[in-house]
Image: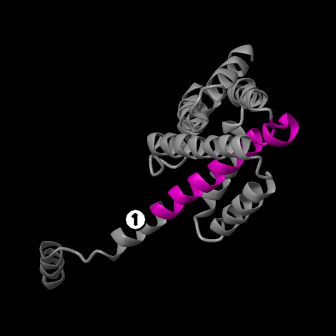
Amino acid sequence: MPAGNYLGKMIAGMPYRMILIPIGMLIGFFIVKAEPAIYVLMEQVEEITSGAISGRAMGLSLSLGVAFSVGLAMTRVLTGISLLWFILPGYVVALCLSLFVPKIFTAIAFDSGGVASGPMTATFLLPFAMGACQALGGNIVQDAFGIVAMVAMTPLIAIQILGAVYRLKSRREAAVPESYLDIWAEDDIIEL
């Protein structure tokens, strides 16, 4: 906890305060790799779906989602924008996506939102945001505490986007016409 707070204070105290956003995104990208529950979830999803949803693709989409949410949270720390301007549209997008993606992706997305905001996020990213907020002279209660809520929200969107890509890919593969050799072989079998 003290390391995150100290790091947030040091980075926010630099002359170029906007550097807080890309550094926060980088930390958010790699903090997912440190969550033990993420690996368990990726293995279970890959096993349940018989490899249709690869753990690697899921891990990458989770990392990108968390990086994006930490970037938004650092933007909030720098500007003081209300949390509602991020959370409300984010959950509306997540709920709308749930209407278009396969149900398995929606279930996995909501589960991964809880997993991504696990112990590493709470013990490192929250103090990181608090330290940055203290260094900038902002209101810690209003500006720093939304980071866990945002980290829980973006995997919902990221995994469901992965589901939308999966659905488009499977439809495209189903629409590909058979090759002429396959048609010719079927005609021979029918004629016999």
Where 91 falls versus 14 (above or below)? below
Counting from the top left corner in percent of width and height, residue 16 is at 57, 33
Q: How many marks?
A: 1
Task: Identify the secondary structure beneath mark 1.
Answer: helix
What's the residue at 57%, 52% (across, down)? 159
Q: Nearer the viewer, residue 176 or 5?
A: 5
The residue lying furthest to the bottom in this view is 191
> Is residue 182 on the magenta stretch?
no
Q: Nearer the viewer, residue 85 or 67?
A: 85
Counting from the top left corner in percent of width and height, residue 33 is at 54, 29
Counting from the top left corner in percent of width and height, residue 114 is at 73, 41
The residue lying furthest to the front in this view is 15
* Dominant secondary structure, magenta: helix
> Dot 1: within a 10 Å radius of its alpha carbon, few (fewer than 14), some, or many (20 or more) residues?
few
Magenta stretch: give its range.
138-165
Where 34 falls versus 87 (above or below)? above
What's the residue at 72%, 55% (across, down)? 86
**Is 9 left or right of 21, judged from the image as shown?**
right
Q: Amino acid at mark 1?
A: Lys
Q: Which quarter of the figure is the C terminus placed in?
A: bottom left
Q: Nearer the viewer, residue 166 or 25?
A: 25
Where 82 falls versus 10 (above or below)? below
**Is 78 left or right of 31, judged from the image as shown?**
right
Q: Which quarter of the figure is the N terminus placed in?
A: top right
Q: Residue 100's quadrant in the figure? A: bottom right
Q: Nearer the viewer, residue 60 or 100?
A: 60
Counting from the top left corner in percent of width and height, residue 165 is at 46, 62
What residue is disc 1 on?
Answer: 169
**Is 105 left or right of 179, judged from the image as shown?**
right
What's the residue at 74%, 25% (across, down)? 131
Q: Residue 78's quadrant in the figure? A: top right
